[in-house]
Amino acid sequence: MLFFIGIRIGFRYLLSGGSLGGSATSLYFNIVIFMAAGFTIYFPFRQLAIQALSGLKLRSPLYYKRIEPLDILLALSINNVRALLTLTLGLMALIWALTWDFRMDSPGLALCIYLLTVVMAIGFGICLVFLGSYNKFITRLIKRLINRILIFTSGLFFATFELPLYSRPFVTWNPLLHAVELFRYSLNNEYPIPDISLSYLIWCSLILLGFSLILYRTNESLLLESVDD
């Protein structure tokens, strides 16, 4: 967390042309709350992706017909939802401790973002299960790409409105950025979110989940690895 706060300070320094004065985001959030709001959405999504890459293969000595690989991924998702809710409660406590005034302007939107993030994470995780089943080199490559791409395009240490107009398309393709920014907006409706769309997040989540379920249903046998005793 401290590492990303340091990145946030460095990013603000670059945007301000060498000044560490207050940034535009400080008008809406304390820097700790700004970062914590991003981690609340980012962390469970990343964890599910990394866990999915670790493999969900069922070996024959432990295989039980009523348990399918998808059940394992759903169990991991439930655990990540628990982590998500824990982070949210921690964020609320942090807001109260720093400001003595809890604020959530749109709790319904916040809940919607949670559910869409979980749906998107499940779909993304199922796709990664099959990508990671080819060989270890592809798995390591995907892990590195996930870590770097998600960190630098999901809005953890920057706000979309801080970016120049010409650079926004390089990050707004990422639906996780839309989830992070919309969650911040649900805390404070005065927070500006240019080029951020709830409908884009909804479509990405549903399309990704639908595609992943089709992929799973047609290739489920690839996840069942038999082992000779």
Image: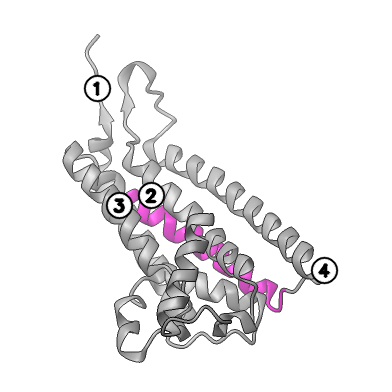
The picture quadrant where one finds residue 166 is bottom left
Region in magenta? 104-126
Query: Does the magenta-highlighted stretch encompass residue 132?
Result: no
Of callouts 3 and 2, which one flags the residue occurring earlier in the amino acid sequence?
A: 2
CA gap, disc 1 and disc 3: 22 Å
Residue 142 lies, in percent from the top left, at: 25, 50
CA gap, disc 4 and disc 2: 36 Å
CA gap, disc 4 and disc 1: 57 Å
Of callouts 1 and 2, which one flags the residue occurring earlier in the amino acid sequence?
A: 2
CA gap, disc 3 and disc 2: 9 Å
Mark 4 or 2: the one toward you: 4
Residue 114 vs 29, above or below: the answer is above
Residue 77 lies, in percent from the top left, at: 50, 47
Residue 178 vs 116, above or below: the answer is below
Residue under the point 75% across and 66% down: 98
CA gap, disc 3 and disc 4: 43 Å
Mark 1 or 2: the one toward you: 2
Residue 191 lies, in percent from the top left, at: 59, 84
CA gap, disc 1 and disc 2: 24 Å
- Residue named by callout 1: 226
Q: Amino acid at mark 4?
A: Trp
Of callouts 4 and 2, which one flags the residue occurring earlier in the amino acid sequence?
A: 2
* Label ID, residue 100: 4
Q: Amino acid at mark 2?
A: Ala
- Residue named by callout 2: 49
* Label ID, residue 127: 3
Of callouts 1 and 3, which one flags the residue occurring earlier in the amino acid sequence?
A: 3
Left or right of 139 on screen, residue 64: right
Q: Amino acid at mark 3?
A: Cys
Mark 3 or 2: the one toward you: 2
